[in-house]
Image (cartoon, rainbow, N blue to C red):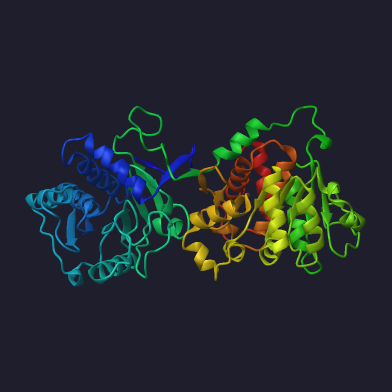
Amino acid sequence: MRPVLPLSRAQPLHDAVSSRRIESAALSRHAPHALIERAGLAVARLALALRPLGRLAVVLAGPGNNGGDGLIAARHLAARGWRVDLRLVGAEPTPGTDAAHALDSARAAGLAPLTDLGTMPRDADLVIDALLGLGASRAPEGAFAEAIRAVEALRRAGGLVLSVDLPSGLDARTGQPLGAHVVEADHTLTFLTLKSGLFTGEGRALAGRLWFDDLGEPQGDAPGGEVAAHAPALLFGRERIAHWQRDFPRSASSHKGRHGDVVVLGGAPTMRGAAWLAATSALAAGAGRVYAALPDDDGLAWPARPELMHWDFARWSAPADAWRDVVAVCGCGGGTAIAPALSTVLHGAQRVVLDADALNLVATDEALQAALCRRAAHGWPTLLTPHPLEAARLLGFRSAADVQADRLAAAAQLAARFGATVVLKGSGSVVATPQEPLSINSTGSSALATAGSGDVLAGWIGGMWAQSPEIPPHALATAAVAWHGAAAEGHAGPMLAADLVAAMAALHAGAA
């Protein structure tokens, strides 16, 4: 058993279907009930580690194997001298199943499961949520909804909530609640596979601290290991920063001409700060030269960053080839004023990052959409960095909620539609590129939920890309997103975007 985060290397992520396939293969290699006994013991061991001085545990067990894990954990806790209040929710397990074995063994150990949820104690040290697992596909109702409400009440009263495999009521793939009732756990112990829903959408907030136990099954490339094979997605983290630093070092003979040019197209009047943040971020990432292409450029020096240069207005109307060799970061505070130049950029620049207002312009202009799609046919990579509402506009959805309902599918759909690499921002940002595995970022925190943090990310991508034009866009996006999130970890409270740039720059020193 180990904590999942922080990552030391990328990990495969699974949905309910692929997890069931791996679970079935694992069961075939063991004697009856052996695997569920291991799982239940693991739950009990983690419970004891989390609450070493605890005396009273409430265990809520559903009718499936998830409930069986909880029943076996209850048996082990009782054997260690804990008072265990055990409640069964739903029908009793089918005879002959692992769950039925778990219930029989609990009763044989002297535990007397109850079904009345209204008589539970209110002073539990620990609450084990073993109600619903991978099999849940619809909103909890009836007794299950009541049980989830009971877990919430126990948590408010001070009970530590440990969920088995998934917080009950959470979709294993999307990370969204299946309905109005979902457990908010302090800790989640997941088995055999990491589920994508634990790392994106609401999953990161609802799962608490994540733990993983492979139950002794082979992982990855180990003999007999199916876990890494055909995984629907990948989880990445700080290792992506280390890979970039290893693969693209700055030599002792470096000079600015070797590290490329970035042009930030944005910063309309009243929104100059967005372009300033993106340009400053590109500079801090290590780009050789950074220019700002601003509507109504007054030519004045940039605040506190004299290194930044102006992209003369006359160059806006220059032939598309004028943009060919720069990395164009478009949209940061640009409004509609950048629309004419955006068309030129899409037709001329070989490397383009589209953010914010550039994405909104594309969403409403079929000619810009066609130009964006033609870039893929030319072999010119484009990177899109939408937040959920911008993604909804690009996809023609009614609202951001339609994107959030299945972030993985939305990101994949955007990438396929435009032939681009997409960073769907949010909790557990999703990176999607045609012909590449969907990837979810494990770094970051709520400190990033501030104005301008997206502009910083767009600029950082541009700055990294300028230095390493040969890097595949998917590898670029995962490295930049991991870097962006890592810089905010451990920060107390909201992080101002300008401070985020400084924190990202500090990771150049090898703190990754």
Query: Depth check: 449 or 457 in front?
Result: 457
Residue at horizontal 9 percent and vertical 53 percent from the top = 107
Q: Is residue 62 left or right of residue 437?
A: left
Q: Is residue 174 left or right of residue 461?
A: left
The C terminus is located in which quarter?
top right
Q: Position of residue 450 (x, y in %)?
A: 62, 62
**Residue nearest the viewer, comparing 469 with 215:** 469
Question: In this image, 471 relative to 38: left or right?
Answer: right
Quarter of the image holding residue 180?
Answer: bottom left
- The residue at the point 91 percent across, 59 percent down is 299
Please say if 419 is above or below 116. Answer: above
The percent position of residue 211, horizontal first and vertical second, equals: 37, 46
Name the residue: 74% across, 63% down.
333
Tell me, yes or no, if residue 271 can be seen here: yes
| Quadrant hosting residue 142 | bottom left
Where is residue 63 drawn, in percent x and y? 19, 58
Q: Position of residue 81 (x, y in %)?
A: 16, 50
398 shown above or below 137: below
Q: Toward the viewer: 52 or 391?
A: 391
Decide if residue 380 is in sight here: no
Task: Give the mark count.
Answer: 0
Quadrant of the drawing holding the N terminus: top left
Which residue is drawn at the image coordinates 55% and 71% (left, top)?
398
